[in-house]
Amino acid sequence: MTLFLDLFSTKVAYASLDSFILSVNKLIVNPLITLLFALALAYFLYGVFQFIANQENEEKKTSGKSHMLWGIIGITIMMAVWTILGLIINTFNITEVNPEEGEVKLPEYDP
């Protein structure tokens, strides 16, 4: 009888907000950043191909230049974000980052 009642009872899984955010970061955000970086690189390479393949057609060469420019802008923005994160980590002398636990270890403060 308890097995029958157990089938209809509500199962609740408890998780902390930190673990949820870390899971979203690990499973959604990081792959999305990789995908966007790959798309920016593909867009740039498409522009290079379009520019080289259409040397006679000035309109398609201009379109290829535009694709290359926007691809470089996208890659530059993403690299700037990584650079800013690196500067923050080096400025605050962060020695260890544990994203699974949501912890950042800083050196001891000695005034």
Image (cartoon, helix red, strand yellow):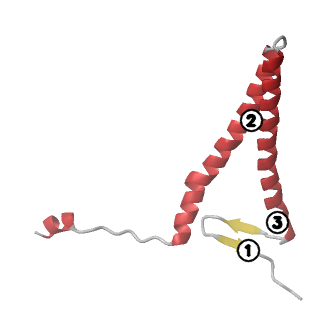
Residue at x 78% of width, y 55% of height: 81
For the residues carrying marks 3 and 2, which lies nearer the camera in this image?
Answer: 2
Q: Quadrant of the C terminus?
A: bottom right
Label 3, on which residue? 88
Do callouts 3 and 1 mark residues in contact (Cβ within 8 Å)? Answer: no
Q: Quadrant of residue 83?
A: bottom right
From the viewer's side, name the closer residue of 45 and 12. Answer: 45
54 vs 27: above or below: above
Label 1, on which residue? 105
Label 2, on which residue? 41
Which amino acid, mark 3?
Answer: Ile
Residue 21 image position (x, y, % from top left): 56, 64
Residue at x 81% of width, y 66% of height: 89
Q: Quadrant of the N terminus?
A: bottom left
Q: Earlier in the sequence, mark 1 or mark 2?
A: 2
Residue 97 image position (x, y, % from top left): 71, 66
Which amino acid, mark 2?
Answer: Leu
